[in-house]
Amino acid sequence: MISPAPQRAAGSLFGLAFGDALGKPTEFLTVAEIDSRYGPTGPRELIGDPVLVTDDTQMALAVGWALHDAPTYTAEAVEPLLRRRFLDWAASPDNNRAPGMTCLRACAELSRGLPWQQATEAGSKGCGANMRVTPVGLLDVDLDTLAGLAQLQAGLTHGHPTGLAASELTAYAVRLLVDGAPLADLPGLLSARARQQRTVYRADWLGDLWQRPGERTPAEFIARGWDECLLALGRLDVALAAPDDGDDPCRVTGAGWIAEEALTASLYCALRHPDAPVDALARGARSTGDSDSIAALAGAFVGAANGMAGWPVDWAGRIEYADQLAALAARLSHPGTTVRG
């Protein structure tokens, strides 16, 4: 029997791009404005050929290719590859999709050759930390390596502990789904992971990132990030326990501009529509917050759960960067082709 992992990996990467594209034109709009343009169920059709994406997909591809090129999964091997891919993205003429200022500022500092712990935006926990982490969740690696890679790729631009923790949880969620975990189990599994990892500072991946004014120990630094994620997951549990009113997910999870809210808002969309992937994307795109990032991560989750079969058959051929998405899905998820730390 052929393993479902490659199809789930492809479903996840393509789902991220599909959600990114659907949410792209609705970002910064009110729900009333979205409804006036697309109707009360939000955008449900991809427009264009190719269908354009944003920096969310572009940066996910940058992470994916850095992982693909790595001879081994260690901080020393992967950091220079991430740095180069991020700087190539920052300088690319295709980087014209309203990229996040945190990423641009951090890349400007990285281009000076500074250690990444100095180049990063130390106070930022923006969703740019985890909007691009999906490829890490597709790797055939142990959970410690997955955690280190997820936090490292976040930390190059977003140095806040919540950005690190939320990125690990996002990658872990993708891993769980690719491995066959039910979507409904994710909130409990992610909360358990957050409690388990609460004081684990990964010095072999993060170095001296924790050494900031006011910080006393590495454990206290990273615990702040896990605690904020646990609070966000608690709000998600409360929202899911209530009847679904079909309205803006940001009303119950937060607007998604910051990492822990992007995680929980996208999970809310995926969990409300586990067997209807396009509905999950439309729910994320029909939001008042960071619509493209929410819909992108929702797509990564429902795509990992349902595989490519969950998406309309004509979408994959029209989405921008389709060839790269397909190649990375095959290369990152195929057992025996990845390396371990």
Image (cartoon, grey):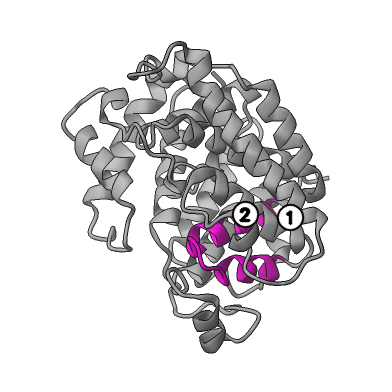
Q: Which residue is mark 1?
A: 239
Q: Quadrant of the C terminus?
A: top right
* 231 or 80: nearer the viewer: 231
Left or right of 214 in this view: 106: left
Q: Is residue 182 above or below residue 336?
A: below
Left or right of 282 in this view: 241: right
Q: Could you say where residue 28 lies in the image, as x and y percent from the top left?
A: 42, 69
Q: Residue at x 60, y 75 (%)?
A: 314
Q: Are marks 2 and 1 in contact (CB under 8 Å)?
A: yes
Three-letter code for the amino acid on which mark 1 is drawn? Ala
Q: Residue at x 45, y 68 (%)?
A: 27
Residue 2 visible to an observer of this rendering: yes
Three-letter code for the amino acid on which mark 2 is drawn? Thr
Q: Which residue is mark 2?
A: 253
Q: Residue at x 75, y 64 (%)?
A: 273
The quarter of the displayed image where residue 110 is located: top left
Mark 2 secondary-structure assignment: helix
Q: Is residue 121 above or below residue 239?
A: above
Q: Residue at x 73, y 44 (%)?
A: 177
Left or right of 320 in this view: 230: right
- Whichever of callouts 2 and 1 sits on the residue coming sooner in the sequence is 1
Please give the range of residues in magenta.
277-304
Mark 1 secondary-structure assignment: helix
Q: Residues within 10 Å of mark 2 (few under 14, many from 20)?
A: many
Cα distance, mark 2 to mark 1?
8 Å
Q: Could you say where residue 137 lies in the image, as x and y percent from the top left?
A: 60, 38
Q: Is residue 171 above or below residue 193?
A: below
Q: Is residue 253 above or below residue 32?
A: above
